[in-house]
Image (cartoon, rainbow, N blue to C red):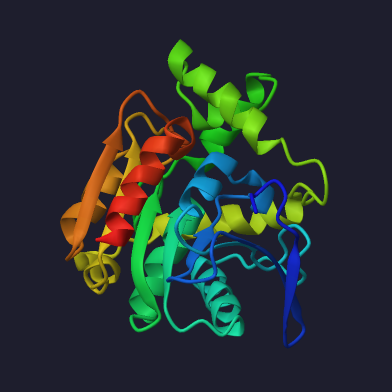
Amino acid sequence: MSLETARTEYLNVDDVRFAFRRLGPTAGTPLILLQHFTGTMDAWDPAVADGLAATRPVIAFNNLGIGTSTGRTPDTVEQMAADAGTFIRGLGLSKVDLVGFSLGGMLAQVLAMQHPSLIRKIVIAGAAPRGGEEHLLAVVEDAFAQGAPDVRLPLFFTPSEKSQRAGQAFVARATARTQDRDPDSGDDVSVPQAKAIIGWCAVKDEGDTTLRAIAQPALIVHGSDDTMFPSINAYNMFKAMKNAQFVLYPDSGHGAVFQYPETFVAHCHTFLDA
């Protein structure tokens, strides 16, 4: 089952319905995918999701208010992480790994800190720590102003010919699913999520208490020319965390993991299998 063809399932927890899809084998530690700003399950790169699912169970889901999940999208990273934890526990899982991209990488930090017995390992891609540097609104506004055929081309990739070619290939993969696609996010998602990201980065975390509280092994992956969350964020996370590895991909922007999907998948397999 691939990301393009996996059926959408639903999990009801109290008065909330979470939409999710399962990929890969049934045996092994499940890998939960935590998505970026305004992203749905269909915003994941199939080359990444399917590559990760080659050897392990992978679960992509829509958090509250996203896609076909119900509820209202929160405006804090902490509440989004709490909702993700509700989803994971609602599936009856006792031990999981996390891949968090961008906003999802912030959720991964909170989940790892607050649930050390539930979270085994984390992969943080294109994210910032609490109190980190962000240029979300400026980068998003600039990307839309460029009038590109798909806003993700200037948003996730550098202007170089190589990076833009990779971006076009990513867009083609990410739009290949035609049946049962998630609806795109609107202001009811983008406004609270933007507030959450800006709030997460606005308050300095003196002594990096959040990062230093994370004892699980972590793989930190970033693009060399990420304009939304500059790469200094990744380096600072690497320095503050107890058990982290750091990979920086060349000539790449915020969507480095989509520019180098095979490389990213290989790094994840090596890290998660160790």
What residue is drawn where x is 57% and y is 57%?
195
What residue is drawn where x is 48% and y is 69%?
30
Is residue 148 in sight in this rendering?
yes
Task: Name the residue at the bottom extreme.
Answer: 14
Q: Quadrant of residue 83?
A: bottom right
Say whether residue 194 is left or right of residue 98: right
What residue is drawn where x is 78% and y is 62%?
68
Which of the two residues, 129 or 273, is positioned nearer the viewer here?
A: 273
Task: Name the residue at the top extreme.
Answer: 161
Q: Quadrant of residue 108?
A: bottom left
x and y percentages locating residue 264 in the rendered image: 38, 41
| 250 w.r.t. 19: above or below | above
What residue is drawn where x is 74% and y is 79%?
16
Q: Quadrant of the C terminus?
A: bottom left
x and y percentages locating residue 237 in the rendered image: 25, 55
x and y percentages locating residue 58 in the rendered image: 53, 61
Q: Quadrant of residue 63?
A: bottom right
